[in-house]
Image: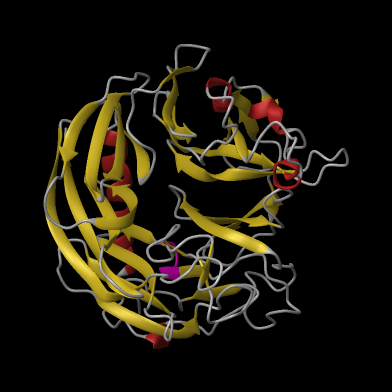
Amino acid sequence: MNIMKPINLFLFSAFISLVYSASAQNVKSVKLISDVQVTSEGLYFTGEKKKDFIFGRRITPHGDCIDVISGYVFVTWYKGGMDKRNLMLSRKKVDSDTWQTIEFPYPHVGFRGNPKVGDSHNRAAIRICPIDETVHVVFDLHGYMKEELPDRYFSYIVSKPNMAFAEEWTIDNFNTLRTYLREDENYERMTYPEFNRFDDGRIMVDFRNRGSGNGNDLFSFYDGKGWSKMFQYNNGNQPNKMNYNFYGSFKFMHGKLYQGGSIRYGLANSDDNFKYDGNNGLFLAYADAPFGNSDWKDIKGNSIKIPLQNPDVIKVAEPCDINPEKNNVKQPFWTVSISGDVHYLTSVGDKNVHFYKNADKNEFLYSTDCPPPGGDILAIGNTILVVTLENGRPLMKSTPAGENSWNTLLKETRGDSYHHCNVIFEGNKIFLYAMKKGTGDAQPITLLTYEVKW
């Protein structure tokens, strides 16, 4: 008998209610209430780029690696150093200082399956489904084919039902590794797994299929019984050499499913004369439930159908226009307030740029007087809050939604410094999951928790 399920569904509903009850308020302050180290052995890539690692040094924490639900925090990480690399999963109660950790026998596969070369694409994404209290982790993906990695081209582990909040936290709670979500679909060539959770408890996973200049975003829903067939958000494989891929994310906010970010044309990878050196543009669309092919709209409310063919139908701005000598947009951080105000933080060359639109206006404005992109940008009530690192230490700045009037809420100038961080907001708390600056290929990772006051 499962006696925890009614309690946890109640707590999940309570969190949802608390978030919506804050929708008409402004953030006044944030305060650090705990700093709890997860491990001293988080994997970090050292050595020479393109020899010892590819793309970047970061793999822990990275991507959609943290979830907070029903009074628990769950985090994924890889164990350092490079001679280990095992997938790890830790959880604790929000108010506790004690982590429970599971070590899985699934090491980071390395670049194209080479265990001696790290690949920073291979993050581990996690989400809890409160319907059946299962833990879902998709990890170690970078466009692999079955023929090159037959047992690890797609890596998915899921717990047995009713185990997310079980008292015992062991590997026996989990099923063995799978190379699929559902057996009748093909999961080759996937990259960048991310999750969302809806108000009814269902979860969604999405990933890129194919490459950086011709990728399709695919997504699927889990309802406590199984995974749906995949939906295709866009068709990045165009017949006129204008292949493209979205560099962005899906976000479930305020009862709607949004997709936002920038794009990269295939020609940016292959043609030195193409007008963009890398990513360009800002794009946004949203869907109402049930989030099917005919439920999508642009930000003006005009209906669009997926899979998208021409991305320009949802383009809202072009940051490259303000710094044409650079022609490369860093993947933006973005959010939408409950009132419909839209905010993007990005950079073009050495310029940080804030693009924003008040819900009552039609046009986007921009300003270079803004915080640096990084960490995350959150919509909390009537406040837009940026949580990032500056000189390796936490920085939090806020502006009223729909404006560019930044106020510093927190700026650490002493204490620990960090390589990088991931951020999530739940209830009335901000969770900053970060790697401390250390030495070697095994370095400390920690969870900082901040209380938000309205």
Picture quadrant where residue 51 is located: bottom right
The colour scheme used to paint the residues is: secondary structure
As rendered, which of 415 and 453 lies closer to the eye?
415
On screen, residue 160 above or below 260: below
Give coordinates of residue 321: x percent, y percent.
58, 21
Q: Residue at x 63, y 43 (%)?
A: 246
Give coordinates of residue 447: x percent, y percent.
24, 61
Assign the C terminus to one quadrant of the image: top left
Give coordinates of residue 28: x percent, y percent.
15, 30
Picture quadrant where residue 188 is located: bottom right
Q: Residue 69: say if magenta.
A: no
As rendered, which of 134 and 109 lies closer to the eye?
109
Left or right, 166 with reference to 261: left
User: Does any portion of residue 10 appear in the rendered image?
Assistant: no
On screen, residue 325 above or below 69: above
Assign the N terminus to one quadrant of the image: bottom left
Left or right, 16 with reference to 223: left
User: Does any portion of residue 353 appear in the rendered image?
Assistant: yes
Give coordinates of residue 242: x percent, y percent.
79, 38
Residue stretch in magenta: 130-135
Q: Residue 134: say if magenta.
A: yes
